């Protein structure tokens, strides 16, 4: 029980339960099926991108171009569909474009040792500029049933996209805990030089996961376009910072070597519940960002102090031979 209490994930679960009870007591609309379906769909779409972001953060890297990749992917996917390209081929073309963007990020960072922030910030600007130029700033609509069916379909009243995403999150979390190829991300993020000495190809691994992160962002962009029945070139602005915050709340470190997929998912769930709760509580729109920022820093501090307490307890146990 003591070990469980010291886990960050356990602390986040407690916070989430308290939030649900508090919000539900103030506004009964929180417990409605429609509200939870909306939360489930939004959570699922952002979780897809969060998987790639978590991989990169564990390995000591990050990518702030994912939101722009989402916007470009949604626009390209919808445009291809409108012009008569079958959905499977449109999806493959979109994924290929995203893969090239991810490869570019990974190549520049590993080959030329350019800072990840500068590289992905430049990519973010280029990609966003590209989608704005292609669209001339105008959104497009694609409301055909074939285009929207997956994002709107349900199984036993639960959004299909949520069920699939949760299954993928579970598989990814287990892979990070048990599969050697994914475990090496912790070695790379913890000590890059040591990882190279034991035979891990650090540069190749990072390029692969930059490609993975970009392609996952493309999947999220396509699913979002399907859900909304179209695409906007200015969509998802600031989304990359939300995902970074979610992963850090869940236990990832910007220095690498830490984090779990389960923790990142809980961090994202916290942000969704926080936003939903502030709306339910009718917080003044002019104080909305202040409230979000305040609660974010509180949770990050709680997580940090909890992590430090766990580390001290572990050292004490080692010293006492427990």
Image (cartoon, rainbow, N blue to C red):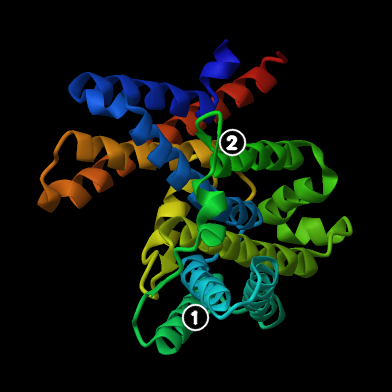
**Quarter of the figure with residue 260:** top right
Q: Secondary structure at mark 2?
A: helix
Mark number for residue 127? 1
Residue 307, how many percent across, how many down?
A: 50, 32
As drawn, is 181 to the left or to the right of 29? right
Q: CB under 8 Å between callouts 2 and 1?
A: no
- Crowding near pointer 1: few (<14 within 10 Å), some, many (20+)? many
As drawn, is 287 to the left or to the right of 273? left
**Quarter of the figure with residue 193:** bottom right
Mark number for residue 33? none
Residue 245, how many percent across, how many down?
A: 42, 50
**Quarter of the figure with residue 283:** top left
Mark number for residue 262? 2
- Crowding near pointer 2: few (<14 within 10 Å), some, many (20+)? some
Q: Is residue 50 visible?
A: no
Residue at 75%, 41% in the rendered image: 175
Residue at 64%, 77% in the rendered image: 97
Among all residues in the image, which is located at the extreme top?
Answer: 1
As drawn, is 301 to the left or to the right of 317? left
């Amino acid at each position: 029980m003591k070990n469980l209490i010291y886990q960050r994930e356990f602390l986040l679960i407690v916070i989430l339960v308290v939030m649900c009870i508090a919000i539900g007591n103030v506004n009964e609309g929180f417990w409605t099926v429609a509200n939870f379906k909306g939360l489930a769909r939004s959570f699922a779409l952002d979780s897809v991108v969060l998987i790639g972001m978590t991989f990169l953060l564990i390995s000591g890297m990050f990518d702030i171009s994912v939101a722009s990749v989402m916007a470009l992917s949604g626009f390209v996917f919808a445009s291809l569909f409108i012009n008569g390209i079958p959905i499977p081929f449109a999806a493959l073309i979109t994924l290929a474009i995203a893969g090239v963007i991810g490869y570019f990020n990974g190549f520049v960072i590993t080959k030329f040792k350019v800072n990840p922030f500068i590289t992905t910030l430049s990519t973010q600007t280029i990609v966003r500029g590209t989608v704005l130029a292609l669209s001339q700033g105008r959104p497009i609509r694609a409301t055909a049933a074939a285009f929207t069916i997956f994002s709107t379909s349900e199984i036993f009243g639960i959004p299909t996209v949520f069920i699939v995403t949760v299954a993928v999150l579970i598989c990814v979390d287990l892979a990070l805990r048990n599969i050697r190829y994914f475990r090496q991300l912790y070695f790379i993020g913890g000590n890059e030089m040591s990882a190279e000495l034991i035979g891990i190809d650090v540069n190749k691994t990072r390029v692969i996961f930059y490609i993975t992160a970009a392609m996952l962002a493309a999947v999220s962009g396509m699913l979002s376009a399907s859900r909304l029945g179209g695409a906007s070139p200015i969509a998802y602005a600031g989304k990359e910072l939300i995902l970074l915050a979610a992963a850090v709340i869940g236990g990832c470190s910007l220095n690498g070597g830490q984090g779990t997929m389960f923790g990142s998912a809980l961090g994202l769930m916290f942000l969704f519940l926080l936003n939903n709760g502030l709306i339910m509580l009718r917080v003044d729109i002019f104080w909305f960002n202040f409230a979000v920022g305040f609660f974010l820093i509180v949770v990050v501090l709680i997580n940090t102090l909890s992590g430090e307490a766990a580390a001290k307890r572990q050292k004490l146990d080692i010293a006492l031979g427990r």
